[in-house]
């Protein structure tokens, strides 16, 4: 089932992004930093959703293309394309930084608890999709950054499958 916010009495602050024609929101609490689109070191013979590596404060951080993972089409390199830096957990328990390349990153929104709805459908193939937010006449779906990677991508990156 989709996850509920930890405190349903408080607003959820989230970064808004686009994938295809749809709008999504990632809770600010799930993010380490929002970065501009950087030049990435390409990694030959990796899955197409691997955008490359970026240098973050002297550390090589893997960046994945959220658009390819969700729609099969790559993010466009446009002014609003950003890298959303998040933290994920490896199988050995260590924390690991991961970059999520996303386009249409336009700012943050305050989502009031009373505007959250369930999607009325659950797809095991998309565990990262959470509740729907009715915000200013628009439907945005909440994305849980720690659940974006599934199946093959979790195995390849030796990450833990976070249940919730």
Image (cartoon, grey):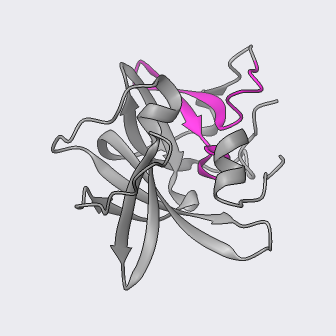
- The percent position of residue 62, horizontal first and vertical second, equals 47, 62
Residue 48 as seen in the image, left or right of residue 89: left
Q: Is residue 21 magenta?
A: no
Number of numbered discs overlaid on the protein picture:
0
Q: Nearer the viewer, residue 97 or 155?
A: 155
Magenta segment boundaries in residue numbering: 122-149
- Residue lying at the far front in this picture: please name it: 45
Task: Name the quadrant of the N terminus.
Answer: top right
Q: Is residue 106 above or below residue 56?
A: above
- The percent position of residue 41, horizontal first and vertical second, equals 31, 63
Identify the image quadrant of residue 83: bottom left
Q: Nearer the viewer, residue 113 or 41?
A: 41
Q: Is residue 130 above or below residue 162?
A: above
Q: Nearer the viewer, residue 142 or 152?
A: 152
Q: Residue at x 34, y 74 (%)?
A: 55
Q: Residue at x 57, y 58 (%)?
A: 30
Q: Residue at x 74, y 14 (%)?
A: 120
Q: Residue at x 30, y 51 (%)?
A: 82
């Amino acid at each position: 089932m989709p996850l509920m916010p930890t405190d349903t009495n408080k607003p959820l602050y989230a970064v808004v992004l686009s994938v295809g024609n749809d709008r999504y929101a990632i809770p600010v609490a799930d993010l380490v930093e929002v970065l501009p689109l950087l030049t990435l070191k390409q990694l030959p013979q990796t899955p197409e959703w691997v955008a490359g590596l970026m240098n973050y404060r002297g550390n090589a951080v893997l960046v994945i293309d959220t658009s390819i993972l969700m729609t099969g089409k790559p993010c466009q390199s446009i002014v609003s394309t950003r890298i959303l830096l998040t933290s994920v957990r490896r199988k050995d328990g260590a924390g690991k930084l991961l970059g999520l390349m996303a386009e249409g990153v336009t700012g943050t929104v305050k989502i009031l608890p009373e505007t959250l709805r369930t999607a009325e459908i659950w797809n095991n193939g998309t565990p990262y999709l959470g509740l729907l937010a009715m915000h200013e006449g628009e439907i945005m779906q909440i994305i849980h950054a720690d659940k974006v990677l599934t199946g093959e991508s979790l195995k390849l990156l030796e990450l833990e499958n976070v249940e919730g």
